[in-house]
Image (tube, rainbow, N blue to C red):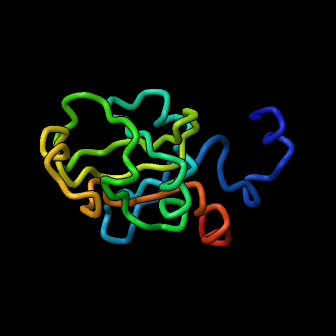
Amino acid sequence: MMRMAVSVGRDQLGSVGVCFGKFTKSGKFTLHITALDHLAQYAQHKIWIKPNGEMPFLYGNHIVKAHLGRITDDTPEHTGAVIFSMSDAPLGFGVTARSTMDMKRLQPTDIIVFHQADVGEYLRAEDTLF
């Protein structure tokens, strides 16, 4: 990819490689969905959702307990997690609302993962993603 980028002028070239995110004006870093493939490989905390929960998540909704398929053991509260389908395809990432132990006692409609980004953003925010 870098060899192909050499043929483009520096003024026209935005970047070479994968865009992981952007820095905001206040100096904070926001992670983009383009980093999902790299995050999925090295994620410590993973959550698998059932097929009936995939579409609501891909439309930007939080994950409820009724859609939970599997979760890695000892996942703490308020930590980042990568969301997978039951066929191990990475769908996005979010922040856990409860720990693994707390999730066992929740009602089916209670939120367990707060949505942060999903692969549906490629279509919804196509012009602002890169």
Seen in the picture, residue 126 relative to 67 is either above or below; the reply is: below
What is the quadrant of the C terminus in the image? bottom right
Give the tally of numbered discs.
0
Q: Residue at x 19, y 39 (%)?
A: 100
Residue 38: x and y in percent read: 52, 34
| Left or right: 29 in relation to 13 | left
Residue 27: x and y in percent read: 32, 63
Seen in the picture, residue 44 relative to 109 is either above or below; the reply is: above
Seen in the picture, residue 87 relative to 35 is either above or below; the reply is: above
Residue 115: x and y in percent read: 38, 60
Residue 55: x and y in percent read: 56, 60
What is the quadrant of the N terminus in the image? top right
- The foreground one among 29 and 31 is 31
Q: Residue at x 80, y 40 (%)?
A: 6
- The foreground one among 85 and 78 is 85
Seen in the picture, residue 83 relative to 13 is either above or below; the reply is: above
Q: Residue at x 43, y 27 (%)?
A: 42
Q: Residue at x 61, y 70 (%)?
A: 125
Quarter of image, res 14: bottom right
- The foreground one among 85 and 130 is 85
- The foreground one among 78 and 72 is 72
| Left or right: 10 in relation to 99 | right
| Left or right: 55 in relation to 82 | right
